[in-house]
Amino acid sequence: MLAQLRIDTNIDASKWQFYRPKNVAIEMIDVVMNEQYSKLREYAAELLTAIGVDLDNQMYPVAYVLVEAETKDTWGWFLELLAVDLELNNSFGIVWISDKQKGLIDVIVERFPHS
């Protein structure tokens, strides 16, 4: 592989001269990745999500949004956008399954009274 790289790039260098930049890049990626993993709890605490189920009983994300807090207002805003995007003109035939998030049930009763 090193010989082919020398032919392709017309650079005569030792394998260590190729490895050093690679290792620096890997370290940079690890730092960024670790920073993002450290924020996972913050993301999970503030993530509104709509999940769908297809005909094969497979779940898939329909929509998600990050908000400052889980409130009736943020749920209302999220579900209103979801209703527009999915063209949910009436609430017949819609089933909601929830883990009783703050404000969600009130918004569903108001916005989708027949679901």
Image (tube, rainbow, N blue to C red):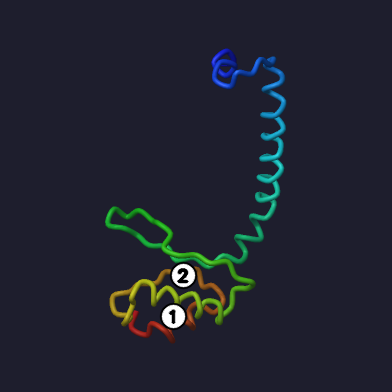
Is 101 positioned to the left or the right of 24 in the image? Answer: left
Nearer-the-camera pick, 13 or 72: 13
Q: Is residue 28 above or below residue 87?
A: above
Q: Quadrant of the C terminus?
A: bottom left
Q: Is residue 20 above or below residue 59?
A: above
Pick whichever of labels 1 and 2 is earlier in the sequence: 2
Residue placed under numbered mark 1 in the picture = 108
Q: Residue at x 35, y 72 (%)?
A: 86
Q: Residue at x 54, y 79 (%)?
A: 103
Q: Nearer the viewer, mark 1 or mark 2?
A: 1
Please state which amino acid type lies under the numbered disc 1.
Ile
Snapshot quadrant of residue 112: bottom left
Expressed as whole percent of the image width and height from the top left, the position of residue 27 reads: 71, 36
Expressed as whole percent of the image width and height from the top left, the position of residue 111 reads: 42, 84
Q: Residue at x 56, y 15 (%)?
A: 7
Q: Quadrant of the N terminus?
A: top right
Expressed as whole percent of the image width and height from the top left, the position of residue 105 reads: 48, 79
Q: Is residue 100 above or below residue 112?
A: above
Q: Pointers 1 and 2 in contact (CB under 8 A)?
A: yes
Q: CA distance from mark 1 to mark 2?
A: 10 Å
Label 2 sits on a secondary structure element that is loop
Residue placed under numbered mark 2 in the picture = 98
Q: How many marks?
A: 2
Q: Residue at x 43, y 59 (%)?
A: 61
Please state which amino acid type lies under the numbered disc 2.
Ser
Snapshot quadrant of residue 84: bottom left
Which labelled disc corresponds to residue 88?
none
Is 66 positioned to the left or the right of 110 in the image? Answer: right
